[in-house]
Amino acid sequence: MTGAVRATIASRPRLGIMKFASCDGCQLTILDLEDHLLDLLVRFDLVEFAEASSYRSSGPFDIVLVEGSISTPEQAEEIVRIRRETPLLVTIGACATAGGIQALRNWADHDAYRAAVYAHPEYVESLATSTPISDHVAVDAELRGCPIDPGQLLELLTALTVGRRPQLPDESVCLECKRRGTVCVLVTGNGPCLGPVTHTGCGALCPAYARGCYGCFGPREAANAPSLARWFGRDGRSDADTARLFSGFTAYAPPFRSVIDSLGGPPIASHSGEDA
Amino acid sequence: MVMTSAAVPGFLPRAGLDRLLDLLAADGRRVIGPTVGQGAVVYDEIHHASDLPAGWTADQAPGSYRLRQTGTERQFDYAVGPTSWKHETFPPRVPLTIGRRVNGQVTFEDALPAAPPVAFLGVRGCEIAALLTQDAVLARGIAVDRDYAARRAAALIIAVECVTPADTCFCTSMGTGPEVTTGFDLAMTELDDGFVVRAGSPAGERLLERLELTAADPGRTTAAQDAVAAARERMGDPVPTAGLPARLIAAAESPQWAEIAERCLACANCTLVCPTCFCTGVTQVSDLDGFEATAERTWDSCFTLGFSKVAGGNFRPRVQDRYRQWLTHKFATWWDQFGMSGCVGCGRCITWCPVGIDVRAELMAVAPPPPALKAAVGIIEPARPTTVKSVPPAASAALLTAPIPLPAVEELPPTYARTFVAERRRETVDTVTLRFDTSDPDLLAGRPGQFVMAALPAFSAAPISVSRFHRDGLELTIRAAGAATRALCELRRGDSVGLRGPMGRGWPVDAAEGHDVVIVTGGIGLAPLRPLVDALLADRTRFREIRLLYGARSPADRLYVEELSELAARPDLDVGQIVDRAGPDWFGRVGVVTGLFDQGHLDGPNAVAYVCGPERMMTATVDVLRDRGVSDDRIFVTLERHMECGVGLCGHCQLGKSFVCRDGPVFSLAEMGPAFGREGL
């Protein structure tokens, strides 16, 4: 967040919360900030909030939180317009930051999928790919996760209010496991875990329940996914099974994507339409 | 029946363990010890002997840990697991201070939690060494981590000697075990029917007396010793440490680092399971408005990118640099810093590396012992002591023999002194100078080149060089580079801020006595040099010719413009100024600061140089100075590193063997050696 951007933001900034291709779960996380909602409304002029109200504003906004990936030609145009009019654009969630689970179609035959799902595929205008917002426009900050973490969201909004850089570390999930005293599930054999290559922010939720991280926050900085994939393959796991581990909500994010490619693509793409 | 005394070990039947636990509870101590949880032997609260992992052990290998039942009643038949005692003595999150802002005024108060009495049950030899190692780092330096010191003093150490080392263990190589020889209150050795117990401190002796044990018979005493000796035998000496520090330093450019980085995930697990790793960051936990914020000390790691982030970028972006920093610090520069090894050989980093990187193998690959080198080229010689500078493990053990007396917590200084802005002057478009009034004797006693940590609630504290000392205050010149410095720049007259310091080692003024002085600086780099100029001019006759060479991006980017004109008018000081880009009003030189060296003669062999500016400017300047014959021990530079604590405790600012905040920020080139200008350190 640059000083120039900050300087253009009013004392009670106009906030818009919008969505593209997504399940709305991240917006629900915002609604779930129940104890803080009134405080937030004092500090932010919440002009538009897709999940909470059908009211649509023509803008402009000081800050826009965007949920969802770009999945249709219309969305691809819309995000360019929003970016042009918005000083501070923040993407929220795995769809907006990595393309989401729907980005698995990027490996598949788009027309075949459309024909398998819809009775009249010709009515459905979708792009062959689902891509993160940052593939289309510059993004000022991003909140990862499927869904986003309420703590990180509050930290972002607090930082915007106070005027400091949000503390959103790009380290591995492992640090949080260790800080909270969770024993490594990968080492004890309680399952494969993407935590070492995954962006922190969830508070290391899954390993605390004795299951591996499935990477919903996407790759972290310097994510050495190939090394972890090699390790997964060591104890007899097939390439397809290793690829499946990376083929989740953030499969299309680059280091995960290339690992999946090197292992022959996400297993789902090789199935027939009915199986998928 | 012979009763035990300090000199005679006692025998505690297995059924008597609960009596020990009861005594500890009666003393108001929480007992932390081994228990089975989450598929491992972890340390947690122990209420009854039945909480202990009776009949459990674990098979450990690089990247693998599997619990296994032994079919015996033994309660301590495992090797160290994923948790270490630092969870108790150095918890992952500790609130440090609470900062508040009310009507523009700030206050800071200590938020350190209390440290109630505790007993650690089942501490291994390697783990005692780890506690003593962290004592040296956190409680024996120029600064003391108050929370650590309090927790450490509150802990009673009940050791249980290790007789079942894992395949990942190498305490024998590091000289820390398996025998327990120091740093304990009680030490026990487990036999099939109970424990041989001895005291290692007055507190342990009192506890032993209250246990009212019978003396251990010679058969049991011998069996106990034999069991530990057998453990030693089983481990062998997997990491020959003779000359290891020197070999590692010499291997700084080894291609092996890049090879390790192919496998290393930089996930930080090794550093967090390590019982001696002490690096921390500070996070701000604030309310929505930032009116109240708690600064928390949080476990950090040299493997994260944020760890080595500075305003200008990152000094350790590559994973191979981070791995090298970790390994070299553990096994080499820790000796320079603390006179001991940073590794105790517990093997946690091996077991808990998610991709099974084995530090023993990497050490041998990166810095092979000379015989192995010779073997590699086909010359086979019997292993014998090498001629390389050797630091035997015994030296480490010797340093660990006497536990360090811990300082009394109440004697330690408070955190931030509230200080008021008396004057605010804009220097450039993004830089202001703030003058603070203070009567704080510590702040007033600062020397040129030292810095202070400046804190506002909800912002991370920023290290700022003092740009002038007054009898009743000091000045800070601050550029709005990030959020914290921007908030500082926005302070107005009458506002307050928390200041801590001054810190670090400043410019050595006396080194210039009788010499020519050349001060070379760029941009905001003039700020930390201004008190040096003040000091030189205050005692002008002690020095020969003084030249100040100042470069800036443009005329408008210069600091202290009026002052520079006044200085330039002085007959006893030569001021040269140059800018990268001139405007219509600029009639001076255009170019980079090294261009100023062509004016006037520089008597290199007789000169002392002080340099501060952007990294590239400093490197270029040093090249010219060396070229003109200024020797490395007379070229002083100041470094910008990521600093969180300012007193050598957080680990962020490490550069080779130095903590920049504590040992610097001013260094001579001779002190820095090959570290100057090198990437990735």
Image (cartoon, rainbow, N blue to C red):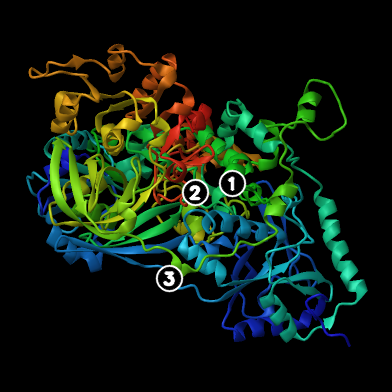
The answer to whether residue B677 is visible is: no
Task: Kindly identify the residue that appears in the image at 69 percent across and 68 percent down.
Answer: B184
Q: Secondary structure at mark 3?
A: loop
Sequence-first tag of 1 and 3 = 3
Q: Are marks 1 and 2 in contact (CB under 8 Å)?
A: yes
Q: Disc 1 vs disc 3: which is toward the camera?
A: 3
**Residue density around tag 1, few if under 14, some if 14–19, many if 20 or more, within 10 Å:** many
- Residues at discs 1 and 3 both on one chain: yes
Instruction: Give the secondary structure at mark 2.
Output: helix
Q: Is residue B626 left or right of residue A121?
A: right
Q: Nearer the viewer, mark 3 or mark 2?
A: 3
Query: For the residue carrying disc 2, how many other residues have a C-alpha within 10 Å: few (<14), some (14-19), or many (20+)?
Result: many
Q: Is residue B33 left or right of residue A66?
A: right
Task: Identify the residue position indicated by label 3 in the image.
Answer: B113
- The residue at 13%/42% (across/down) is B425
Disc 3 sits on a residue from what chain?
Answer: B
Find residue A68 and report its horizontal and vertical position in percent: 27, 45
* Spot occupied by residue A9 in the image (x, y as percentages of width and height): 12, 46
For label 3, the crowd category at 10 Å Cα-Cα, with few meaning under 14, some 14 to 19 and many 20 or more, is few
Can residue B664 be seen at all in this image of the molecule? yes
Q: Nearer the viewer, residue B462 or B560?
A: B560
Q: Look at mark 2 in the image and give the residue it sits on.
A: A195
Q: Amino acid at mark 3?
A: Pro
Q: Which mark is residue B354?
A: 1
Could you tell whether A28 is left or right of B141 in the image? left
Circle 1 — which element? loop
Q: CA distance from mark 1 to mark 2?
A: 10 Å
Q: CA distance from mark 3 to mark 2?
A: 31 Å
Write down the chain letter for disc 1.
Answer: B
Q: Amino acid at mark 1?
A: Pro
Near-viewer residue (A24 or B238) = B238
